[in-house]
Image: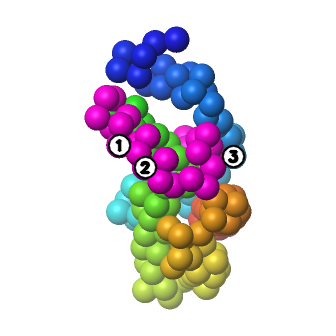
Amino acid sequence: MKDLADVAHESEFREYLEYCGWRFEQSREGQLPPIRDDLPDLYRDIIPTLRDYLFDSFLIFDPFGEDNHTRRAASTYAQEINPRLTEWVDQHSKLRSNRIFPCITAMFAIAEYFTEIADPLAETLTQIRDQAMTPPNYSTMPLSEKISYVQKLDDHILGFVSALSPP
């Protein structure tokens, strides 16, 4: 296996991390349902954020478990040696706040649009969005609770987008 500094291509990142004891779980496969035609482009353009979270990100389990001190030290070391690899993990981990927040923001914006135009769908979208909100203590939650939250978030995102399907 190559050294950390020599892992240069995205295609090698996952293989390298798996060699180091990391596990990857992709929670969804497939495609989003079609989106109704009357959704303005401003909102249609943020749907890929939701799609990418569902289909292009993973539950990534590193070998550190609940040991956040060691995780931070390893991350700092990896960032110094191979920043592209750590960026790839940040961009593909469902557990990262930087992946979750844009999804919540997208759902918030779309639900607010339907509220502003007094569309009956607003109530459904707002209800799903509110159920998907990130707990205020997310950063300090135990890993098992974070996993449970993001698994439910997947369901909420899929339900939200499905509600945007043509009638």
**Quarter assignment of residue 60:** top right
Query: Is residue 84 visible to the viewer in this orientation of the structure?
Result: no
User: What's the residue at 38%, 34% (across, down)?
Assistant: 78
Q: Residue at x 61, y 55 (%)?
A: 66
Q: Callout 2 environment at 10 Å: few (<14), some (14 to 19), or many (20+)?
A: few
* Secondary structure at numbered mark 3: loop
Q: Quadrant of the C terminus?
A: bottom right
Left or right of 94 in this view: 78 = left
Q: Position of residue 76 (x, y in %)?
A: 35, 43
Q: Quadrant of residue 142?
A: bottom right
In this view, the residue farthest toward the top is 1
Q: Which amino acid type is shown beneath numbered disc 1?
A: Thr
Is 64 magenta? The answer is yes
Question: Mark 3 or mark 1, which is nearer the start of the sequence?
Answer: 3
Residue with the mark numbered 3: 27
Label 1 and label 3: CA atoms lie apart by 28 Å
Q: How far is the residue under mark 3 from the one under mark 2?
A: 25 Å
Q: Position of residue 58 (x, y in %)?
A: 60, 43
Q: Are marks 1 and 2 in contact (CB under 8 Å)?
A: yes
Res 68 label: none
Q: Write the start and end of the magenta stretch as one range.
A: 54-82
Q: Residue at x 46, y 61 (%)?
A: 97
Quadrant location of residue 144? bottom right
Q: In the image, what residue type sits under mark 2?
A: Arg
Q: Is residue 35 above or below residue 125?
A: above
